[in-house]
Image: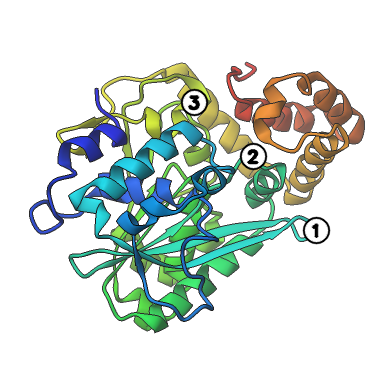
Amino acid sequence: MSNILDYVRTYGNETFTERHFSSADALVLAQLSYMDWSEAVPGLKDEKDFIRLKDLLYFEDLERMIRWSVSKTGNRELFYQAANSKRFGEVKLNYYLDIWNEDANVQLSALTFLLPCGRACVTFRGTDESINGWKESFSMVYRFPVPAQEYAAIYLNQVGKRIDNPLIVCGHSKGGNLAVYASVCCDDNIRQRIRRIYNFDGPGFWEEFLADERYKETVPKIRKYVAPESFIGLLLKDEATTFMVECKSKGMQQHDPYQWELFRGRLRRVSKYNCKRRQSGEGLNTRILAAPKEKCRAVIDGFFDAAADSGVQKLPELNKEYTLEVLRRFRGNCKYDRESLIVFARLMLYMLPGRKILR
């Protein structure tokens, strides 16, 4: 089965006039947003023209651009293939924004693509490998809105005032959540210009957001794609049209878009999946929603404090020598009832790369 790299190879010679923009294109652009464009693409405040993707082939420091990517090998190949293709090479980039503040626990990156067909695609980066980024993502369990969500809405407003194109908004993981939040909370005139919103395995929201009239107005435009065994897209609640995609891998590795299968240029819907793991994840999400937010905050903060105290800087390190030390410190930091500790320890262990959920 093919993935987005095969998609670019197969359909890269077709323009957006010959083959209309699809969810596969949105996933390609969402994945490209994981790259660090700070030295190559004009920023939101630069007041400079868009730059074509194919012109960035001559940028010297590609390794710097992919340094924070979770899928470095895949992103390197995707960039080269897309930039060299007829379909994506003429796509233009601008308004790069990157906000990082460990003290305020905020991580946000956004980028706008101008398509040859006349539409603009606003993309929000998902969580990178950093502990700071993952802590903010988990804080959605007890905090609403998180800083990245508020910044995302501001960004979409600012881009919408600079260009008058019809808009597509998308993102993977936390980026998908930010795409939905920004589309709902942006100015009315900008929201009306949004044609489609793609949330690729991103978390949902609390009931208070789903009850917002602006969300109800926007939800028909949202398309959400989730991996069967990934917990991220299942977290919290959502009312958007949701599709389950076929994946090549198992467990949390399914959160990686390069593991998602495509068929004839479209994301392939799942035919079968691990029902027990899915049910376990759904049950865990139900228990999270029922828990007091302050208890969620204490346990989640306790876990990430333990990670920081252990010297962990990136999430993949939790699968190496740090794991047992982090869990030992986590247990020592949390002084709450056994049930809440079990629930949220399971949540954290669900996230560890290559590990199975505790049952």
Residue type, numbered disc 1: Asp
What residue lies at 54% left-to-right and 78% top-to-bottom?
Answer: 45
What percent of the width, then of the height, locates residue 334?
87, 35
Residue 103: mark in rendering: 1
Q: Position of residue 332 (x, y in %)?
A: 92, 29
Amino acid type of the residue tagged 2 in the rendering: Ile
Residue 146 appears at what percent x and percent y?
A: 64, 60
Taking depth in this image into account, of 151 and 300 the one nearest to the observer is: 151
Tag 2–tag 1 contact (CB < 8 Å): no
Residue hosting label 2: 288
- Residue at image point 70% right, 30% down: 343
Q: Name the mark on residue 253.
A: 3
Q: Viewed as shown, does residue 159 lie left or right of 16?
A: right
The kind of residue on which mark 3 rests is Gln
Could you tell which of marks 3 and 1 lies nearer the N-terminus?
1
Q: Nearer the viewer, residue 189 or 12?
A: 12
First along the sequence among labels 2 and 1: 1
Residue 57: tell me if it is visible. yes
| Tag 3 and tag 1, C-beta contact below 8 Å | no
Instruction: Characterize the local packing of mark 3: few (<14), some (14-19) or many (20 or more) Cα atoms within 10 angstroms.
Output: many
Q: Dot 2 lies on which element?
A: helix
* Circle 2 residues within 10 Å: few <14, some 14–19, many ≥20: many
Residue 141 position in % (x across, y down): 65, 48
User: Camera-side residue: 52 or 209?
Assistant: 52
Residue at 22% x, 47% y is 85
Left or right, 184 with respect to 117, comes to: right
